[in-house]
Amino acid sequence: MEFNMLTLILCIAGFVLGGLIFFFVGKAYRKSVAEKEIGSAEEEARRIINEAIKGGENKKREMLVEAKEEIHKTRTENERELKDRRTEVQKQERRLQQKEETLDKKLDAHEKKEEELTRRVAAVQKQEEEVASIKRGQLEMLEKISGLTQEEAKAQLLKDVESEIRHETAMKIKEVETQLKEESDQRAREILATAIQRCAADHAAETTVSVVALPNDEMKGRIIGREGRNIRTLETITGVDLIIDDTPEAITVSSFDPVRREIARLALEKLIADGRIHPTRIEDMVEKARREVEHTIKAEGERATFEVGIHNLHPELVKLLGRQKYRTSYGQNVLNHSIEVAHIAGLLAAELGEDVSLAKRAGLLHDLGKSVDHEMEGSHIQLGVELARKYKENPVVINAIEAHHGDVEPQTVIACLVQAADAVSAARPGARRENVENYIRRLQKLEELTSSFPGVEKSYAIQAGREVRIMVKPEEVSEDSMILLAHDLAKKIESELEYPGQIKVNVIRETKAVEYAK
C-alpha cells in the first residue's frame, strides 16, 4: 500500500517534473522561436525604416528641387513684373513731369494774359471816360445846334424809325400781295378757264309776259266772249292777266308767276286749236294744261339730274328742280343756271381732287329756294336750307346752299367751289340783267364807302362797279400809306358790300407843281 502510494507519488512527481521540464523546454523553445521572429522582424523593420529613410530623402531632394524651381520661377516673374511696374512708374513720372512743365508754362502765359487784360481794362475804362466826356460835349453841342433836348431828339428818332418801319411794312405788304395775286390769278385762271371751256352753256332770257299767236283778229272776240265771260273765267282760273290790244293776231299773257303764265299760254293754244271757247271748255283746257306743265316740270327735273349725273334725289326735290325752268333771276333761267353751276363746281372739284359727285349735287341744289312761290316766307337761301334738311340732304350740300351768298362761313372746300361756280355763271356776259335803280344804288354805296376814309378827296366807281378809283390828298396820304389805304379799303368793301365777281381798288396820289414863266 505504501509502495503503491510511493509509486503513485513518484508517478505524480514524475508527471509534475516532466510537466515542468516540458514547460520550461517549451518555454525556452518558444522564447528562442520568438527571439528569432523578433530578430527577423527587427531586421525587417530596420530594412523598411532604412528604405523609408532612403525614399524620404529622395522625395525630400525631389521636393527641394521642385521648390527651388518654383521659387526661381516665382522670383523671375516677380522680377519681371517689378521691372515692368518700375518702367511704368518711370513713364508716369516722366509724363507728370512733362505735365508739370506744361502747367507751369500755361500758368506763366495766363499770368501774362491777366496782366495784359488788366492793362487793357484800364485803358478801356480810360477810353470810356474819354468817350463819355466827348459824348457829353457832343450832346451839348448837338442840343445847342439843333435846338432840341435829348427827349425831343429821341421822339424825333422814334418818329423817323416808325416812318421807316411803315415804309418797309407797306413795301413788304405790296410785295407779298403782288406775289400772291400773280400766283393765285394764274392758278385761278387756269382752273376757271378749264371749267368754263368744258362747260359752255347757253341762256335764253325770259320776261314776265308770253305772247300767244292768233290765226286771225276775230279770235280775240271769241276769247273775250259775251260780256267778257270767257276772258274773266280764264284769268280767274289761271291767275294771269290777258292783254288784248291793237297788236295784230296776238294776245299777251302777263304774270309774275312763270308757271301760271305757262299754264295760261298752253290753255289758250289748246282753246284756239279746238275752236270751242266757253267757260266749261276753258276749265277743261286749263286742267289739261296744268297736268302737262306738271309733267313738264317733272321731266325737266329728271332731265337736269340725268344731265348732271346726280341720282337718288328725293322725288319732291326733282319736282322743285323742274319748277326752276319757269323761274328767272336777273333774266337768267334758274334751272339752266343751276345746271351750269353744277357742271362748273364738278369741274373745279375734279381739278382740286375733291368729291365731284357731291360738288355737282351741291351746285345743282344751291338755288333750291327759288323753286317755291311767295306762299313760303324767307330768302331763297333760308328756304333752300329748310327744303334740303326736310329731305335729308348731305350736310355738305346744306352748308353749300347756306354759304353760296356769304350768309355763313363755308365749312368745306365744296361750299367754296359752289360759291365760285355761282359767281362764274352769273358773271358771264349777258347772263343776267340788273335793275337800273339797284345798279345805281350799288355804285353810290361803293363811292360813299370809299369816300368815308380820311385823306380821300374823290372816288369814282367805273367799269360797271367792278373798279373804284380813289383820289387822295397828297398832303395827308403818303406814298407808303397808299398801299395800306388800298388794303384797308378792299377789306372794308369785302365786309360791307355785296357784288358779283371782284372790285379793283385803285388809289391815285398826284402832286402837281405849276409855275408860269413871264
Image: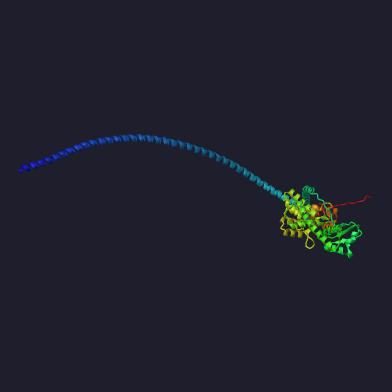
Residue 474, picture quadrant: bottom right
- Which residue is farthest bottom? 227
- Image x and y of residue 41, in percent: 26, 36
Can you say whether 107 is above or below 452 in the image? above
Q: Nearer the viewer, residue 393 or 516?
A: 393
Give left or right: position of 275 versus 169: right
Q: Position of residue 289 (x, y in %)?
A: 81, 58
Looking at the image, what colour scheme do you see?
Answer: rainbow
- The answer to whether residue 6 is left or right of residue 222 is left
Query: Taking 126 as reference, is 294 above or below it?
Result: below
The quarter of the picture where residue 14 lies is: top left
Judge whether residue 144 can be spotted in this image. no
Q: Residue at x 88, y 62 (%)?
A: 224
Camera-nearest residue between 125 and 347: 347
Asked whether 510 or 301 is in front, the reply is 301
Residue 100, relative to residue 363: is it above or below?
above
Rendered location of residue 261, percent (x, y): 83, 59
